[in-house]
Amino acid sequence: MSDIQIELANINKHYGTYHALKDVSLRIEKGSFVALVGPSGCGKSTLLRSLAGLESITGGTIRIAGEVINNVPPRKRDVAMVFQSYALYPHMTVAENLTYSLRIKGVKKDVARKAAEEIAATTGLTGLLDRYPRELSGGQRQRVAMGRAIIRHPKAFLFDEPLSNLDAALRVQMRKEIRSLHDRLGATSVYVTHDQIEAMTMADHVVVMREGVIEQQGAPLELYDTPANKFVAGFIGSPAMNFVPGTIAANGHEVVLDLPGAPVMELGRQVEANRQVTVGLRPEHLSVVPLDEASLRLPVAVVESTGSMTYVTTATTPELTVVETGRTAAKTGDNVGVRIEPGNVHLFDRQSEKAI
Ligand SMILES: Nc1ncnc2c1ncn2[C@@H]1O[C@H](COP(=O)(O)OP(=O)(O)OP(=O)(O)O)[C@@H](O)[C@H]1O
Ligand SMILES: [Mg+2]
């Protein structure tokens, strides 16, 4: 059995009458990197802050390293939080910021300095120890914030959207740095983000939340390949999955799409006949093909190219997005053939939105 470092059992949190966390249960293995992801307001920060002890929960049990810590004050929980706003002390140098937690414990100056140098080497801050936060770039400040957490050797690192202040290129670099730091330290990390790409690329285990509830959790590609419901299907993957209403044919192994021409698709499995469904098609599983090879013939509304990829959006209701690698000849106003890659069709119950 693997070691469970953090265990949340049936956590509930009310802010007055607002029910922000609804019976949330989650087990986090020692050494794992877990991402909490979901739209704004779904309760990610509330969950993280409850773990850190910055919010009091209204029900449930939190264990860290086996010990119930519901009533343990934040300072004694032995977790370190890293926020979006780095919350560095502006009047202290990098070295002083890094070693603040040591110095308040009375650690000697030269010992603290040596610790600061070691952390600087780990986090890429060597040579910057005597600067003030205002003399650093955003990425460097974020490294100081991480260094300050690392120096405490916490039982877990809790990150709340630590990269959202950085530009896109630096975010990509920092997410690799954070992940490799996590691996080198053998840390246990819980990482909140609303960015599913960040969650998918950094984490071993992704937890998708909506309105205070965990909708699904699992390995990144598990969520991508087998989303439990329409919400997770639409949230994981970029651009988002296309959803088209459909009806299972009388033979039970085909679905009729509610699109111009009522195209029929083979499912390769048996489903209850005449069932009303929502069909999920990932943009990357659709391609623009010559009309005579196509499963669908659809008018084009928009063509957007980034150079490496082209996004074709159809002028249909609902609209479909097709992702092509490279370029395409399709233009606005054209009728194009669209092929659906067999075996990559997701079905959801029209009412419950659960995967079929
Ligand atoms: N102190 C508070 N009092 C009342 N309601 C609150 C309080 N803090 C948060 N909430 C509500 O609880 C819900 C969850 O908030 P939370 O900050 O956890 O969301 P989040 O998932 O972190 O969102 P974001 O991605 O925007 O940071 C929100 O609807 C929010 O309005
Ligand atoms: Mg938040």
Image: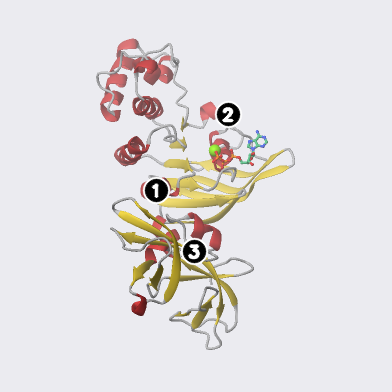
Quadrant of the rendered image containing residue 181: top left
Which mark is first along the chain, 2 or 1?
2
- Residue type at numbered disc 2: Pro
Count of marks overlaid on the render: 3
- Residue type at numbered disc 3: Ala
Label 2 Cα neighbours within 10 Å, binned few <14 / some 14-19 / many ≥20:
few
What residue lies at 61% left-to-right and 34% top-to-bottom?
Answer: 55
User: Which residue in the protein does label 1 denote?
Assistant: 203
Farthest-out residue, bottom: 251
User: Would you say 243 lies left or right of 202 here?
Assistant: right
User: Which residue in the protein does label 2 denote?
Assistant: 73
Q: How far apart are the alpha carbons under marks 3 and 2? A: 56 Å
User: Which residue in the protein does label 3 denote?
Assistant: 315
- Judged by depth in the image, the label closer to the viewer, 3 or 2, is 3
- Residue type at numbered disc 1: Ala
* Percent of width and height locating residue 241: 47, 61
Q: How far apart are the alpha carbons under marks 1 and 2? A: 28 Å
The quarter in which the N terminus is drawn is: bottom left
User: Would you say 140 lies left or right of 3 here?
Assistant: left
**Above-or-below relation of 222 to 66:** below
